[in-house]
Each structure stands twice: as C-alpha cells, then as structure tokens.
Image (cartoon, rainbow, N blue to C red):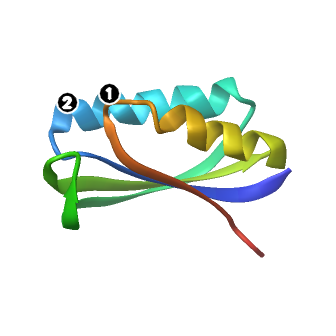
C-alpha cells in the first residue's frame, strides 16, 4: 500500500459538492482504498474556466491504496458530473 492524495475540484454549489464528496468516498472504498484524512480547502476562483465554471470547491483526500488501483480511481472519477478536475498524486514520505 502506498500513500496518495486525491485532489478534487467540485462544482461550487453546496448540494453538488456534498453529493460529489460522497461519490468520491464511495469510489475510493469500492476500489479498496483506505481514506486516512481529508482537507477541505473551500471555494476558490479557478485560474481559467473549466466546463464553463469559474468557481470550484477544492477538497483533498489522503488515502492508502494499491498502486494498480490509483490509475483506475482517476479514470473512474473523471466521468463524474460533480467533479470539474481530479488528480491522484503519490505522496512520498
């Protein structure tokens, strides 16, 4: 198991953010990842429009998972409508 950070940018609306947060948690759990923490960075203005949105809600999940699953998680999350952007990063100790 390796440590990863899953950085997500959600649509800024509160109900969409709450639904998206649960979706990401379920996807991580479904692929065998263990969520060790999360950091809510709040709403921010995006540097450039993404899917016609100018604001996003940033949330970073810290998770332990198998390296083979890390790519699968990123590909699965890119298809979710609540998410504007997602990035999975290997967290070195």
Residue 28, percent from left and from top:
62, 34
SS under mark 2: helix
Q: Secondary structure at mark 1?
A: helix
Q: Classify residue 19 as left or right of residue 71.
A: left
The residue that disc 2 covers is 15
Q: Give me the C-alpha separation between circle 2 and circle 1.
A: 6 Å
Where is residue 6? Give x, y as percent.
55, 53
- 84 above or below 24? below
Q: Quadrant of the C terminus?
A: bottom right
Q: Residue at x 74, y 49 (%)?
A: 64
Q: Quadrant of residue 39?
A: bottom left
* Residue 10 horizontal/vertical position (percent): 30, 45
Residue 39 vs residue 44, the one in the foreground: 44
Residue that carries the numbered disc 1 in the rendered image? 19
Residue closer to the observer: 3 or 55: 55
- Number of marks drawn: 2
Describe residue 47's horizontal placement relative to residue 78 as left or right: left
The answer to whether one can see residue 44 in this image is: no
Q: Which residue occupies 32% across, 30% down?
A: 81
**Residues at discs 2 and 1 in contact (Cβ within 8 Å):** yes
Residue at image coords 27%, 38%:
17
Tell me if mark 2 has few (under 14), some (14-19) or many (20+) residues whose alpha carbon lies within 10 angstroms of its own. few
Marker disc for residue 8: none
Query: Quick check: 57 left or right of 30?
Result: left
Residue in view at x 17 percent, y 38 percent? 14
């Amino acid at each position: 198991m390796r440590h990863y950070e899953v950085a997500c940018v959600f649509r800024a609306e509160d109900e969409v953010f709450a639904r998206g947060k649960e979706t990401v948690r379920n996807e991580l759990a479904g692929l065998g990842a263990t969520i060790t923490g999360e950091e809510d960075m709040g709403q921010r203005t995006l540097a450039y429009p993404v899917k016609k949105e100018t604001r996003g809600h940033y949330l970073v999940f810290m998770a332990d998972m198998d390296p083979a699953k890390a790519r699968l998680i990123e590909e699965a999350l890119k298809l979710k409508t609540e998410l504007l952007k997602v990035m999975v990063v290997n967290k070195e100790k």
